[in-house]
Amino acid sequence: MTELAVMSGQSTALNGWQVLELLVKVGLTLWMLRISYGDHMSGRIPNRLTAPIFLGVGLYRLVEGVLHQGGKGWLQVVGLLVAWAVLFGMWTLHFIGGGDAKFLMALFALFPAVEFLAVLAFGLLVIMIFVLGFEALRQRPSLRGTLESWRARLLTGQLLPTEAELQTRGRRYAWTFALPALAYAWIYWDWPPPPAWWPW
C-alpha cells in the first residue's frame, strides 16, 4: 500500500512537471513568434522582449554553472560568455543589429548547449541557401556590379559594413534564428527531471 502511494505521488509529480514543460515550451514559442513578427513588420526587436530572458536567464545560467555543476558547469559558463562575446563583436562590426544580437544572446542563455549551436548553425545554413537563392532570382544582380562593389570596398579600405549600411540594407531575419531554436526546443531540448521539492 505504501509503495503504491509513493508511486502514485511520483506519477502526479511527473504529470505536473510535464504540464510545466509544455507550458514553458508554448510560452517560448509565442515569445519567438512575437519577436519574429515584430522584427518582420517594423525592423525592431524591443529590449523589453529580450532583456528579461537575456539578463535573467543568463545570470541564472552563470550562477548555476559556477555553483551547482562542478567541472561541467565551468564549460557552460565559458561557452555562454564566448557566445555572448562573439555576438557582441558581430554587433559592433555591424554584421547584425542590436536586437538580433540580444535575441541570440537570450537563445544561448536558454539553451547553453553545443547541440543547440549545431542545430542553429545547420538551420541557418539551410534557410539562408533558400533565402539567398530566392533573392538572387528576384533581383538578378550582375556579376559586374558585384565585382565593382567589392573593388570600391577594397580601394576605400571599407571591407566591413557600416552602421548606415546595416540601417538601410540590413535584413529582418529574426525568424531565421527562431525556426532552428523552435526545432531545438520541441525536439532536442532535454527537460530536467522534477526536483525533490516539486509538490505535484
Image (cartoon, rainbow, N blue to C red):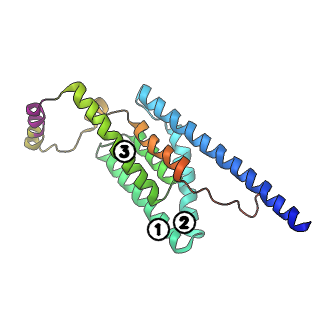
Eyeballing the image, is 14 above or below 31? below
Label 1–label 2 contact, CB within 8 A: yes
Residue bearing mark 1: 75
Residue bearing mark 3: 124
Q: How far across and how far down the image is residue 102, in percent?
A: 45, 45
Q: Residues within 10 Å of mark 2 (few under 14, many from 20)?
A: many
- In the rendered structure, the answer to whether residue 90 lies left or right of residue 174 reads left
Eyeballing the image, is 183 above or below 64? above
- Chain part drawn in magenta: 142-150
Q: Main secondary structure of the magenta part?
A: helix
Q: Amino acid at mark 3?
A: Leu
| Label 1 secondary element | helix
Furthest residue to the bottom? 71
| Label 3 secondary element | helix
- Rendered residue at 8%/32% (across/down): 144
- Rendered residue at 28%/29% (across/down): 168
Residue bearing mark 2: 65
Q: Earlier in the sequence, mark 1 or mark 2?
A: 2
Which quadrant of the rendered structure holds the N terminus? Answer: bottom right
